[in-house]
Image (cartoon, rainbow, N blue to C red):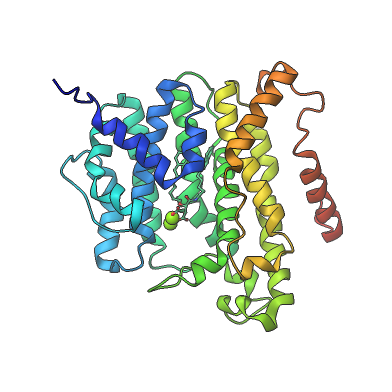
Amino acid sequence: EKQIPSQPHWAFCYIMIHKVSRSFSLVIQQLPVELRDAVCIFYLVLRALDTVEDDTSVATEVKVPILMSFHRHVYDREWHFSCGTKDYKVLMDQFHHVSTAFLELGKHYKEAIEDITMRMGAGMAKFIYKEVETIDDYDEYCHYVAGLVGLGLSKLFFISGREDSVSDSLCNSMGLFLQKTNIIRDYLEDINEVPKCRMFWPRQIWNKYVNKLEDLKYEENSVKAVQCLNEMVTNALAHVEDCLTYMSTLRDPAIFRFCAIPQVMAIGTLAKCYNNIEVFKGVVKMRRGLTAKVIDHTRAMADVYGCCPCCHGGYPSRIPIWKPALDHVTDVRKKDGTSS
Ligand SMILES: O=C(O)CO[C@@H](C(=O)O)[C@@H](OCCCCCc1ccc2ccccc2c1)C(=O)NCCCCCc1ccc2ccccc2c1
Ligand SMILES: [Mg+2]
Ligand SMILES: [Mg+2]
């Protein structure tokens, strides 16, 4: 008789993660099998939560209760909430497949994913009512939507027995670096969002250059816009040293690759954004297929050097790709007289 796939919900999950995020789908495939399923579900649960947050057509009084109770809905096979567009809408409409797969995970994995989902939902709800004014607000918002992902991933690595636990501060920095890079790169897409524009750049930075955040996109302000952009990039670069320290604690080569590749892509994106007026004209994206190339290159370097940095054999000059970026940060700090 027709061979019915025994695990249709897992097929759905791996197909969906490939559709909603090619880059994270590729790096998640790098993980050891028992971590891969937990991280795949962790991604899809949070992506669904974020799709609710991002949908500016959902009324606040409807959105906030969903964000606050999302961590409980993952246990309810019947629950779904229709929102988002294209593949994100498919994820929302078919969310019961994610719940079914979630319930098959080990107990500790489920607890970790539920805890982060609850904390992220509450943080997102708080910022529905609160604008990002100060740099502290900016760091707090990024902690909720990305720093917590770093904490959760480190918990999953620890539960799998493959990594020791790492300080919350270092895990948080891994997320802040990636999220701040996204916020810088997506300025124009966010400010032009309909029906309501999305603003994440902190007033404490942009109000030194313009009166309103949207003024940065107007031609006559382009010199100030690039100065403001460069300050945002320098703010993001402050997390690089913590990210390096976090990655230097990793032991498992597959986990190292999973963590290092998004960081390498982000540093590339920041380099493309720095001093680049195009950020205010269109989204400055990395070339399509670049993640796959970086994955091949990282594997090739491990083969060539016979080990990878996390085996503590290390490449000859331990962190070759980071050296120029670190030197730049030090130079900028010296110029600003803020060197530590
Ligand atoms: O809507 C979009 O497409 C972009 O949404 C952005 C937004 O709305 O701000 C924004 O949504 C944030 C809320 C949902 C977070 C979903 C997520 C992302 C990556 C994961 C990676 C592995 C496991 C779980 C993950 C969960 C977004 O996707 N920003 C991209 C940066 C977030 C990076 C999170 C992160 C943190 C630490 C990490 C450490 C190691 C490896 C990957 C890491 C990944
Ligand atoms: Mg989003
Ligand atoms: Mg969001």
Residue 255: x percent and y percent? Answer: 55, 27
Residue 238: x percent and y percent? Answer: 69, 50
Is residue 190 toward the left or the right of residue 112 in the image?
A: right
Furthest toward the front, the residue is: 1
> In the image, ligand 2 is in what quadrant?
bottom left
Residue 255 against residue 183 in the figure, above or below: above
Residue 40 against residue 212 in the figure, above or below: above
Quarter of the image where the N terminus is located: top left
* Residue 98 position by quadrant: top left
Q: Is residue 132 visible?
A: no
Residue sitting at x 19%, y 25%? 4
* Residue 252 position by quadrant: top right
Residue 12 against residue 226 in the figure, above or below: above
Q: Nearer the viewer, residue 39 or 246?
A: 39
Is residue 101 toward the left or the right of residue 335 in the image?
A: left
Residue sitting at x 60%, y 80%? 215
Residue 150: x percent and y percent? Answer: 51, 39
Residue sitting at x 47%, y 69%? 131
Q: Nearer the viewer, residue 313 or 166?
A: 313
Is residue 301 toward the left or the right of residue 26 in the image?
A: right
| Count of numbered labels shown in the rendering | 0
Q: Nearer the viewer, residue 334 or 98?
A: 98
Residue 182: x percent and y percent? Answer: 56, 55
Q: Is residue 112 visible?
A: yes
* Residue 327 position by quadrant: top right
Is residue 148 toward the left or the right of residue 93 in the image?
A: right
